[in-house]
Image (cartoon, helix red, strand yellow):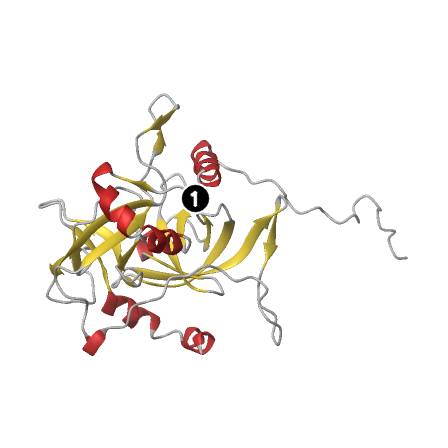
Amino acid sequence: MAKKMNKKNNKKKKPNEKLNLTKIQKKIITYVKNNSSSLNYHEHSLKNINTNKDLIQKIKSSCLCQVSDFFGSAVCINENGYILTCAHAAPPFEDDNTKESLYIFPSGQIIKAITIDKDEKIDLALLKISEIYQNKKFIKINKNKGKKNLYKFPYAKISKAENGLNPKKNEKIFCIGNPGFTMIDDDGYLEHNEYKPFWISFGKIKGYLRDQIYCKNDLGPLIHNCWTYWGHSGAPLFNYEGELIGMHNSWNEKNADRHGNSLLGIIKFLEKFQFLKNEDK
């Protein structure tokens, strides 16, 4: 005889509508939402900010802050929600198999992203936005075959490698990244510093390592002097046309040089993803 189903157990479970966040994650989200239009920078950068304000505001919209206790940076490179960051800043990690990350745009839009691929030698990772947070719940945005994607995301254009070369030494650049501005101290209290998410710093390309594509001893091949802090891994480097020309990934403890993934490294990494080329047509 068929067993009668318990009506109580047969009820559909409601999706979890609450964001289970740590103190630091809540602080990141609150700050970004309350300061969506503000620009954060060192006082000595004011002249550069005023000269390039409109461009910076536009480019900033494509950048992302990782909502985690360790911070982290990234940039959207495609209107359908493909994200570029450093491999060492993207899951899965050694102690966790999950491929899911939580990020926030400067607009305050919270998103979930799934890691598609990582290249440890170039130290780059490609992620895809899978869900957006609206009305206290996550909504999946997977594109259905034959239907247009209803969600379009702000994105940065990747520069072309002129004559197959990286941008030249001494080219002026700027960086938009997320220095860790709050942490838990030894007593379990939130500790703050002067830095904020989507910090803008200016500098130039100082040169390249011999191999201009792959990392050496975890140091990216591009050497620059934009100011960075912990949490800047995956922070995009832009030229004064607003094009992505590199990505900060490390700093040299011996001489304090900042290092990053080069434009040629980014192009090399993205070559394998034919679907990106198809979507850009």
Residue 77 is left or right of residue 1, and the answer is left
Question: 199 above or below 206?
Answer: above
* Image x and y of residue 193, in percent: 30, 30
Task: Count every numbered label the image shows and give the total.
Answer: 1
* Image x and y of residue 40, in percent: 33, 40
Tag 1's secondary structure? loop
Asked which quadrant contains residue 269, the reply is bottom left
Question: At 20% across and 67% down in the image, what residue appears?
Answer: 213
- Of the 4 image quadrants, the one containing the C terminus is bottom left
Question: 86 above or below 157?
Answer: above
Q: Residue furthest top?
A: 187
* Image x and y of residue 27, in percent: 44, 34
Asked which quadrant contains residue 227, the reply is top left
Question: At 34% across and 28% down in the image, what residue appears?
Answer: 192
Query: Which residue is denoted by mark 1 in the rendering?
Result: 37
Q: Is residue 5 visible?
A: yes
Front-lying residue, 15 or 231: 231
Question: At 60% across and 40% down in the image, what residue appears?
Answer: 18
- Of the 4 image quadrants, the one containing the N terminus is bottom right
Front-lying residue, 26 or 153: 153
Question: 137 above or below 221?
Answer: above
Q: Residue furthest right?
A: 1
Mark 1, other Cα within 10 Å: few <14 / some 14–19 / many ≥20: few
Asked which quadrant contains residue 99, the reply is bottom left
Question: At 47% across and 62% down in the image, what residue appears?
Answer: 81
* Image x and y of residue 58, in percent: 39, 55
Q: Amino acid at mark 1?
A: Ser
